[in-house]
Image (spheres, rainbow, N blue to C red):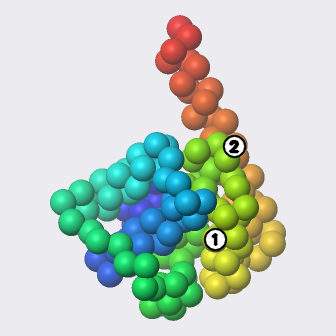
Amino acid sequence: MFLHFIESDEYKYAFLEIAHLAAKADGFVSRNEEGALRSFMAEMNMEDAGIEFSANRSLEQILGGIDDPRVKQIYFLEILMLAFSDGNFNDDEKQIVKDMKRLIGVTDEAYAACKNWVERLDKLKVEGLKLILEP
């Protein structure tokens, strides 16, 4: 949703690396998460990038290479949306979000606002689907 604001290829790859870590956090990449990963790549014009994800870099290492606080905020919000995308915000996903929150320096108040927004957005998506499927 906000990834188009990221201009640097380095930052785009870093986001995809984090998104991949988050999607597989529970040991299973759901269909919704796979779709979200493809959407991320499309939004950043990286569909044909042939990306290979390495298990060698930690979340801390990836985020440590990002100097732009706005980009970090985009990462946080997008990963929070990804964690909610399958309707199951499980413990593994919660841990990645918690780690990102700490590493980026997101306040409790900002986290609550982001989470609230993501939950409302999710409900609006369901409402929109109902409008389409139940005319």
**In percent of the image, x 42 and y 63: which residue is there?**
3
Q: Nearer the viewer, residue 25 or 5?
A: 25
**What amino acid type should be assigned to the residue bearing mark 1?**
Ile
**In percent of the image, x 41 and y 46: which residue is there?**
35
Residue named by callout 2 = 120
Q: Is residue 135 above or below residue 91?
A: above
**In percent of the image, x 29 and y 71: which residue is there?**
52
Of the numbered discs 2 and 1, the one sitting upstream in the chain is 1
Residue 16 appears left or right of 105: left
List x then y, in percent, for residue 89. Answer: 69, 53
Q: Quadrant of residue 22?
A: bottom right
Identify the mark at residue 124; answer none if there is no mark.
none
Residue 27 appears left or right of 55: right
Q: Is residue 71 above or below residue 127?
A: below
Tell me how far mark 2 sits from mark 1, CA to CA. 21 Å
Residue 7 appears left or right of 114: left
Q: Quadrant of residue 16?
A: bottom left
Within-10-Å neighbours for mark 1: few <14, some 14–19, many 20+: many
Residue named by callout 1 = 96
